[in-house]
Amino acid sequence: MRRRFVLPLVATGAMLSTLAVATPAQAHGYVSSPPSRQALCAQKRVPDCGQIQWEPQSVEGPKGLRNCHANIAHFAVLNDDNRGWPATSVGTTVTFTWVNTAMHATRDWEYFIGNTRVAVFSGGGRQPGATVSHTVNLSGYSGRQKLLAVWNISDTANAFYSCVDLQIGGGGGNPTPSPSPTTAPPSPTPTASPTTNPPAGGTWTAGRAYAVGDQVTYGGRTYRCRQAHTAIAGWEPPNVPALWSLV
Amino acid sequence: MPAVSGTPDNAEMTGIDLLFLSMMAGHTEQTLEIVRLVRDRLADTELRTLVAAIEVTEADELETARTWLAQAGRSARADDHAGHGTGPDQLARLRDASDADLDAVLIEVFCAHQQAAADLARAHLAAGNDERVRDLAQRVEQSRTAQVELMAARPAARG
């Protein structure tokens, strides 16, 4: 008799957990480089964009649209050509990088200038990686152009849209839109093969295996190893207090 | 203890910075889940050492990301990283792997997982604003790339 009640409960639990997994997956992707209009909003290079600055990945609408905002009213700013969108200077070959916050199975990616489809890349119905890059040949175009990039999902009726303003020609190659150079501490080039002999001291060296208690110098300071590991770039002693303590 | 102070900078983080932090927080939570599934069962002691170091360094990074998100008034929302990276099927493979296969399965699953973090960080370096977040992205890009190389060099690495 009890079993009759157990089964429905189990089934309900399974349904709830399926929903819990499925419903939050509302997101998405956008072209981060060269910066799309929503990326420029999220970078605050174009001010007063509204909600899109917090969710540049969310410009989702039915497949087949040819505008920048997927007909979403509160993203209409993206479709306004009079917002002073800065155009990125590029050569005739441009690499576009999508950042995907959810990796939907993909039909294809399409790129349009005006009504002309200038490139298409099949997704094969598979899930893409966390980022996807496509190199598109834009020879035949010059000057300022508004390019529409479209990510067509294979298992829904929807697509994601990103408009990218370009200044084609007159400048070489891809843009480097980084607002400022990185100032991370200089790190030695990691050696390919780690050694297994802990040094008796000396300068911190990527590729070396360190044991608890080993001491090294880095940036003029001395550190003691707290946890055994092989040193790698990005794990410089001042950056990883879990591995090194300042002596 | 994270390698950062808890003092907010004058410069506000932008949407693109916070989106990256939110995605990294979700990704790192998955890293810790993967590590905790395998750490006591790995056969290769060097792999075990690497995984243990990844666990402690990423736990600090996660705290840093959460601190910055909280200072910006946003929490790491689940919907920002839903569907990301390593799905339940991959976690099940780790859980179900025999002791003889575990090292190889971990290397396969974890290399893909860490590569995704390196890719996201590289994209952020081309687009991000805040200097602290860019510095974090640089360290993520470097460390995950090196970890993938170290794992691929282990005897259990396939192909």
Image (cartoon, rainbow, N blue to C red):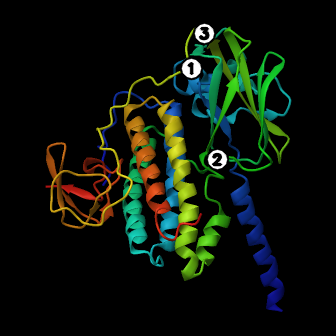
Across and down, in percent, residue A67 comes to 78, 21
The image shows residue B153 at horizontal and vertical percentages of 46, 62
Disc 2 to disc 3, C-alpha distance? 32 Å
What residue is shown with label 3?
A: A84
Q: Secondary structure at mark 3?
A: loop
Q: Are marks 1 and 3 in contact (CB under 8 Å)?
A: no
Q: Is residue A139 left or right of residue A40?
A: right
- Name the residue carrying label 2: A129
Q: Amino acid at mark 1?
A: Gly
Callout in the foreground (2, 1): 1
Q: Secondary structure at mark 2?
A: loop
Q: Amino acid at mark 3?
A: Gly
Q: Earlier in the sequence, mark 1 or mark 3?
A: 3
Q: Which residue is identified by label 1? A: A173
User: A141 or B76: nearer the eye?
Assistant: A141
The number of numbered discs placed on residues in the rendered structure image is 3
Question: Residue flagged by tag 2: what amino acid is it?
Answer: Gly
